[in-house]
Image: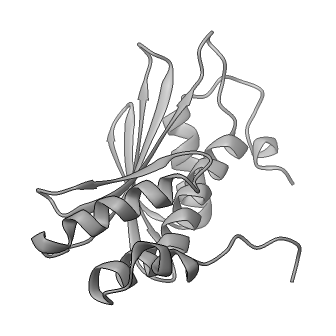
Amino acid sequence: MALSEQFLQEDLHPIDIVEHLAEHYDWEFDRIADDQIAMAVEGQWRTYSITLAWSGYDETLRMVCTFEMEPPNEKLPILYQMLNDVNDQCWSGAFTFWKEPKLMVYRYGLVMAGAQSVSPEQINTLINSAVMNAERFYPAFQLAIWGDRSPQDALQVAIAEAFGRA
């Protein structure tokens, strides 16, 4: 059954849909406000903090996926080079590093201009993409920062996207 079949043909608030998905997948979540939800999604390498917020003003569902990273200050130039190289490989969303809270961040905004409604499949894809990209590039960030590998070498070990079925 498609995710959207679980919902009636009514227009649901995007954060209501996210909440239903979180319940479906048994993710820990907190409905911070009517327009915002925070979740914890377990990955292979880390538990990722994912926040989604709806802005009716610009009709955008914003997602921020974070995980802790505490690189030494002398490694920041390498990290920034890694971010450039990694973002060249991301088709949707982008990584950035928030220095003060020491968080690696993957961000994406789903624009729904023209009063379009967002589907559960779109939101599910958005969240899965964030986790898959974080999982794919986490080892590369680790190798470059703590393994003293060059950004190019570190990216060679990034988990490649899988195609087909097991």
Q: Quadrant of the N terminus?
A: bottom right
Question: Based on the displayed image, in which of its 4 quarters is residue 40 positioned?
Answer: bottom left
Q: Nearer the viewer, residue 149 or 102?
A: 149
Question: Can residue 49 be seen in the rendering of this structure?
Answer: no
- Across the whole image, how many numbered discs are drawn on residues? 0
Residue at the location (20% across, 66% down)? Answer: 76
Residue 141 position (above or below residue 126): below
Residue 62 position (above or below residue 157): above
Residue 96 in the image: state x and y as whole percent: 34, 52
Left or right position of 161 against 79: right
Residue at the location (66% across, 51% down)? Answer: 125
Left or right position of 113 against 52: right
Residue 68 in the image: state x and y as whole percent: 26, 70
Question: Can residue 53 be seen in the rendering of this structure?
Answer: yes
Question: Based on the displayed image, in which of its 4 quarters is residue 99 positioned?
Answer: bottom left
Q: Nearer the viewer, residue 90 or 69?
A: 90
Residue at the location (68% across, 41% down)? Answer: 122
Residue 123 in the image: state x and y as whole percent: 61, 44
Q: Nearer the viewer, residue 64 or 1?
A: 64
Residue 101 position (above or below residue 70): above
Please say which color scheme the image uses: one colour
Q: Quadrant of the C terminus?
A: bottom right
Can you name the residue that lies furthest to the bottom here?
A: 147
Q: Nearer the viewer, residue 108 or 147?
A: 147
Residue 20 position (above or below residue 79): above
Residue 120 in the image: state x and y as whole percent: 68, 42
